[in-house]
Each structure stands twice: as C-alpha cells, then as structure tokens.
Amino acid sequence: MVMASSPRWYRLVDQQGVPHPVLDDLYDSLDAAWAEAQSWWLTNVSAEPVGIGVEVSTASGCWRTLRPPG
C-alpha cells in the first residue's frame, strides 16, 4: 500500500518563532516564502536587521524550522 504524501507548506516566522505578524501566509515552496520576505524587507523595513525565519510543515501536521530567525 502506497501512502500519498501530504503537500509541504512553508511559512515565515518572527524572532519568537511564531507566525510573522505581517507575512502570515502559507507558501508552496521555500523559494516563494523567502522571496516574499525579501520583497517585504526591501519595501517596508529600515536598515536595521529584522529576524525572519522559515518553517516547513511535516507529514504529521507539525512545523519544522528550516531557517531560524536572525
């Protein structure tokens, strides 16, 4: 019996590791999530660093950190 794998989703998180307050959305790829973060950064943030991380959904419905905020 072959089990279908669930689709992977990506989300952006803030410094505390919770969904980002502005970029709280689901993305279909790591590249799409990171591109959204970079675009937002370039248009909305000053020169000061802002920690944004990326998480991926797991088959069990949990989230795993791919890129820690910072």
Image (cartoon, helix red, strand yellow):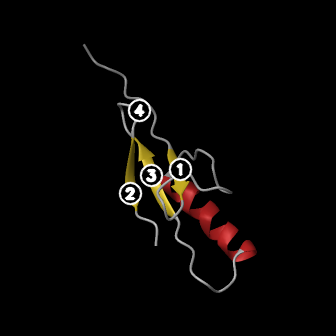
Q: State the residue position of label 3.
A: 55
Location of mark 2 (residue): 66
Q: Amino acid at mark 3?
A: Glu
**Outermost residue, left side:** 1
How far separated are the C-alphas under marks 1 and 3?
Answer: 5 Å
Nearest to N terminus: mark 2 or mark 4? 4
Q: CA distance from mark 2 to mark 1?
A: 10 Å
Give x and y (percent) for residue 21. Answer: 65, 55
Which residue in the structure is indicated by mark 4?
Answer: 61
Asked whether 18 or 39 is in front, the reply is 18
- Disc 2 vs disc 4: Cβ atoms closer than 8 Å? no
Q: Which label was assigned to residue 11?
A: 1
Marks 1 & 4, CB-CB < 8 Å contact:
no
Q: Are marks 2 and 3 in contact (CB under 8 Å)?
A: yes
Q: Amino acid at mark 4?
A: Gly
Q: Where does residue 11 sit, x and y in percent of width and height?
A: 53, 50
- Indicate which disc, 2 or 3, sits on the residue closer to the N terminus: 3
